Image (cartoon, rainbow, N blue to C red):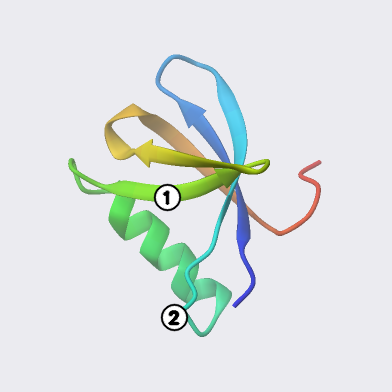
């Protein structure tokens, strides 16, 4: 499964684009479901990429998430 680009809007109002990969998922829909399930929990945490850096995204700081296939988000 290829990764997804997530545009994350934080509760501070800032937004950023991160990549998320879930190697055991068979389809894009499974990855999206995993992201939504994880971020809907108070203690949800996702390990994402931002450029060549690891970014840990905590659910309590996320206000909204947009999903796109890997590539530029327009």
Q: Tell me the residue that label 2 is attached to.
A: 24
Structural crowding at the residue carrying mark 1, measured as other residues with C-alpha within 10 Å and reported as few (<14), some (14–19) or many (≥20): some
**x 49%, y 75%: residue:** 23
Residue in the picture at 25% in, 47% down: 44
x and y, in percent, of residue 7 in the image: 60, 40
What is the x, y in percent for residue 71? 78, 54
Q: Depth check: give the residue in front, 48 or 14.
A: 48
Q: In the image, is residue 6 above or below residue 10?
A: below
Residue 60 in picture, x, y percent from top left: 27, 31
Q: Residue furthest toward the top?
A: 12
Q: Earlier in the sequence, mark 1 or mark 2?
A: 2
| Gap between marks 1 and 2 measured at Cα | 15 Å
Position of residue 34 measured from the top left corner of the image (x, y, whole percent): 37, 65
Q: Is residue 61 left or right of residue 28?
A: left
In the picture, residue 16 is in which quadrant? top right
Q: In which quarter of the image is residue 68?
A: bottom right
Q: Mark 1 points at which residue?
A: 47
How many neighbours does mark 2 have within 10 angstroms: few (below 14), some (14-19), or many (20 or more)? Answer: few
The outermost residue toward the bottom is: 26
């Amino acid at each position: 499964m290829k990764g997804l680009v997530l545009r994350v809007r934080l509760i501070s109002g800032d937004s950023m684009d991160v990549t998320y990969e879930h190697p055991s998922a068979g389809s894009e829909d499974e990855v999206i479901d995993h992201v939504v399930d994880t971020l809907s929990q108070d203690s949800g945490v996702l390990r994402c990429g931002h450029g060549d850096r690891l970014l840990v995204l905590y659910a309590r700081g996320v206000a909204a998430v947009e999903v796109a296939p890997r590539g530029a988000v327009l």
